[in-house]
Structures are given as structure tokens and as C-alpha cells.
Amino acid sequence: MRRSETRTTFIMMPDSIHPENNNDDAIGDDAPDERAFDALLIEAMGTSEPPDLTFQILSRLRQEPVATARTVRPIASESPASSQRRSSKGMLGWCVALAALAASVVGIVWMRGNHSPAIQIATASQDASNETSSAVAVDIPPKSPVPTDATGNNETGNNDLLRAPRTRPEGIPMTLPVAVGDTPSSEGNPLLAPEATRNPGQWSPLPAITWVAQRSGNEMLAYWAAIGIRPADQASDQQVIDRVKRSSGIELSIADLANAKSIQERIATDDDSKAVAGRWLAHVTDGGIDQLSPENRSRLVNDVAKSFAGQSPLDHTVAQWIDGRGESSSAFYTAMAGSSKSVTDGVLARRLASLTLNADLRCTRCHDSYIEGSGRQADYWSLVGLLDQSLVRNKNQWTVTPSAPSKPLFYDLIDGRRRVATAGVPGRWLAEDDATDSLADWSSRLVGSPQLATGIVNSLWEMVHGQPLRGRVVDPMNAPHNDALSSLESFLVDDLRNSNFDLGRSLALILASPANNRAVPQSLEDAWVIENAEAKAAAEAFAAALPEKSNLPLTRRLDEAMRAIGAKLGDDGKIALAQIGENGVKGPKVNADSLSWDFPDRAQALPVQWLLPIEDSTERARHLAYLAGLNELPKPVERALSAMKAAAVDETTLQTRVWWMVK
């Protein structure tokens, strides 16, 4: 190989490094270093020209037999023995150094010519064939021959080696399946743009719902893969249709299933938008909508139906309800309050905070939150204080009154001291530095609010699946939290905000999700409590469906709890035990009807593990009532608790039955 070829192949040495081409003017300040390097070569190798090791290096790289290297000419002034020793040592050092250098050069050139895109776009037809597969697809491209060597020279003496087939790097691209014809371009598409360039609320145009549904589906699959959950089998089409009818009040066709665009169009119809609006209002008010007159109920449902039909942004509607400008403001507050007769009982504040602020107030009425550490008792009473001074109740109707007298509201600290509440909405709930001290200011911050959007997304998800997308760790059942779940929630929240709070679009995305067509595992249908940990974990992560819950009133649940221990609930609400009296006379006859399928016959653990530090059984039951959104343990449930303790029901089963009654 010629000298110029050697320089190009290995280290691209300039001609100035060789003595015969030396030019002090051209070398400049680097001349001493260059000359020293020449002297080093002559001393070590007997020549200023590096040995040609191309064939040996490539042979080693290909793991082929190494041919004999070219003999190195010794320095004339040295003896043969010393020259051989010096040449051997120098040869070994240069082999190691040049092999590493050549491998680096070959590797860099090789990889520069083999870049592959990091993101794949698949069609909906390709994705539909394996819906429950992992969202991460491995792309293994075919091997391809490399036409030239690393220098781009086709005239080298070792072309056969350099032209040998090379395996391209195998990557793990992110698959983004989309419907044919809806493939988005990264240019101008905010969902493909870097996070820092996004401007929530101002994306234009809005991405096609088909593409958004495919991506949110991939987010769900990625979440299951991240937590190691294997999703249950798909449910039948009719099972999915029946499930959607029960949860949302709309009846889909088989053609609508898993088609977000078709589902959105169906939701937008007049009848279906009103049906789903009624179901959603019943959910967020915990049934408080039933407290309204038919006229007020119809007005409130019509307002929400416009948002499900994509005709009116719900954030503006809620803002007008909050500050009293909306025609249905009184109906909204009355439904949210339900059967509550005073703002200070916290029912209205808890429901409003959950929807509009995505804040959980269940565990902060009496003390700061011990579990999640984010809730403060002072914040709870600040919101209660604002509502207390801004609303009045007259003839079972709650209305906003700007002239309400400002009166101090006191609350008890956990140590027995009393403190006055500072009326307002805490800034941390609004993700802002300053708090708000009026309903008008609060309502103005709800327009486009990410907290409101998050509350709506989780309420829609809970309406469909029975639990929020991102639940609270205090709950007996919630999906494991990780970055993949947060990413899915953020994706849906961003889409809701940028669709101008189109609830029909968000609900369509949820109904078209892979989580909505999972089957109910057999172990959950047979026994919810015993030996079904794997199926329960899948259900918590939305990878399996839950059986339909027993829709029973409290009196019926109390009756079943008593019949399980051989007792009955009297007409006066007292518990009558069935026992053998004196002379063998039996006590009151107990109804022997079968119990509900989900009645906890026995349990292996408490409903929530944070009850363990609480030793008193009654106190545990009271905290379960608080967790269920009640301000106190109902008296009939407390009497049932005493009866179960008298019947020697073990503590874990006893508390599980209390939760079944109050939840």
C-alpha cells in the first residue's frame, strides 16, 4: 500500500508530517511536535513510515487467520540482536495503538453510513392485528453489503474484506400507529414537536382524533409493559357494548368499537349527548343531581350536553357556574351539595375541589394528610371559608350572593386548639404563587386551567372504569403510579385543553382505549377477595375489567351483613341476633336469601394498610367512612359493627365488610 494511502486509511496524516514534505512555514507552531513524532517513529520502527497493518487489523476484526506482516527494516547502526528486540517491542506497541485507532475510524465511518430513524409510523391496520402487544416494537433491518471501504477508495488491495456484508445496528424504535391517511407530519404538529416548544391551548390545527386515539392506546400499552402487567383477553363485542351502556348511557354499534372518530360522532348526537351528560353529572355530584327539580335538572344537563357535543367549552361553563353568572349556577351548587344543609360539613367543598382543582380533601378535615403529605388542614378550611361567605341556602337551593356578610369561621386543630380560617383557594391548588379570595377571581382562573382539565379527565375515566386514571394512594384500589401513567394522563389532559374542553372527544378517546375492551378474569367473577392477586393487580392497572358492582342501598347492604352472621335488621334499625334461647326456643327467623356476589365472605387483609397504626376497631371504621366521603360513620353501620364483633368476626373481614357497606 502506498504511503499516501496509509495516511488516509488510518489517521489522515498531513504530508507535512513527513521529512521529505516538511515546510516550516506551513507547519507553523506545531513544527517541534511534528519533528519529535518523526524522530519517535524512526527510533521505534527504523523508519518514519508506519507499518501497513490494514490486513491484520481487518482480519482480526473479521476473526479470520492473520497473514504474515511486512518485515520491518532495522536501523543500520544497531546490532541485529538489539534491533530485533527493539523492533519487537515497538511493533507490539504500535499494533495495539494502531488497531484501536483503526477500529475507531472504521466504526465511525460504518455507523455514519447506517443511521436509521428512531420513530416508526405504522398504519392502523398493522396495529389492529395485535392490539394487546407491547407498545415498543423491535425493528431488525436486513443486512446489506457495503459497496466501498472506509476511505471511499475502491482500488485498495483488500477490497474483498472491506466489501464483506456488515450487520446494521439493531435499535428499538418507538411505534406510533396511526390510521391510513391520518399520518401526521412533524412539521407544525405540536404532538410531535419537542416538549419545550408546546404552547397548550394554542395548538392549531387540532390533531385528528384517530391519530390521538392510536397514540393514547400506545401509551396505555407502554404503561402495562412498564409495570409488568399482562392484560386480560379481549371481551366480546356485546360485552363491551353493554359495559359502555351501563357506564355512559350511550349505545354503540359493533362498527363503533375501538373507533374514536365514530364514537365521538355518536356522542355528539342530541339524545346521546344528553344521556352521557346526565350520567357524568350524577357521577361528579355523587347522586346530588337527584336533589334538583325536573326543570333545573334539565337545564343543567343541557348545559353539559353542549360540551359533550363539542358545541360549548366546559371550562367557560364551569367558570360561569362558580361565580354565579351562569343561568344554571344555582342548580350546579345545589347538585354538588346534594343532601348537605351546611357548607361547613365539607361535602360541597370536597366535590368542587375534586372536579375543578383535582384536589383530594377527604383526609384533611381534621388534620394534615399523613399518607401523601400534600394535603393541609388549613387549605381545606380556606376553601370551606370562601364558600361559606359566598353562598347562601334558601329553600334547599344554593345561590351565589356578593353581599353575604364576612363572618369568621373557626376550626379545631388536632391538638385541640382553635384557629380561624383564611377564606380563599390556596395558590398551590391553582399551581400559582398567589391564592384567590373571591369566587370571581377563582372562576377567571378556571378558563383553560390544567387542574380543571385533569379533574375532568379523571372523572370521565372513573365513570367508565370505576376508578380515576391516577388515583390516590389512600384508596383501597388504584393504578400503580409511574412515569408512563403520568405521561398518559398528561397526554389526555393536553388534548382536552387544546380541543377547547370538548368532553365528547375526551370520552371517545377513553372508550376507544385498549383498557375498555378487556375481559373480566374468572377469578374476579368467582371471588373478589381470595386468591386472585394477579387478576386484581391487572384490574387495578385497567388491564382487566371488574365485574359489575352490586347497586344496593345502604339498608340492603346492612341486611346482608347481618344475615351473614345469622342476624337481621329490624324495622326500627336495631340488630336482632338469631340465637337459641331458653328451652330450645329459636330467636327471630333470618332470611336465608343468597348474598350478593361481591359480599366479602372473608378477607385476608384490611381494605387499606394505613389502618394498621389505628388500634381501635371503631376508629378504623370511622376512617373508612371518611375515605368514602362521609363526615361520620352512619349509626346503623356502627351497630352492625358491634354485632359482627359480638359474632367473633375477625378484624380484617369485619373492616372489609364495613368498607363494602359505606363505599
Image: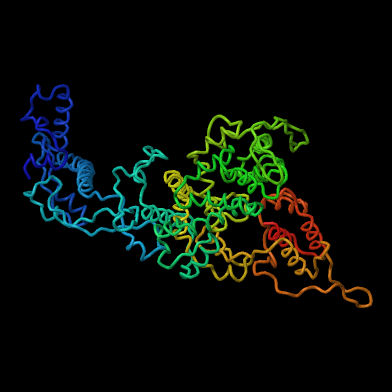
Residue closer to the observer: 364 or 91: 364
**Which of 423 and 652 lies nearest the eye of the viewer?**
423
Which quarter of the rendered picture does the N terminus lie within?
top left
Q: Residue furthest right?
A: 583
Q: Residue at x 72, y 64 (%)?
A: 557
- Report x, y in % for residue 398: 66, 43
- Where does the image place residue 184, in percent across and percent down from the top left? 31, 50
Can the viewer see residue 612? no
Q: Is residue 650 visible?
A: yes
Check the image and tell me how it is coloured.
rainbow
Residue drawn at x 44%, y 52% is 505
**Is 433 located above or below residue 103 in the figure?**
above
How far across and down, in percent of the image, does residue 97 sit? 22, 41
Q: Is residue 110 left or right of residue 606?
A: left
Disc tally is 0
Residue at 18% x, 39% y is 86
Relative vertical location of residue 500 with respect to residue 440 in this rendering, above or below: below
For the C terminus, the quadrant is bottom right
| Residue 400: x %, y % from top left | 63, 38
In this picture, residue 190 sits left or right of residue 304: left
Q: Quadrant of residue 392?
A: top right
Find the residue positioned furthest to the bottom: 584
What residue occupies the far front of the structure in this picture?
A: 295
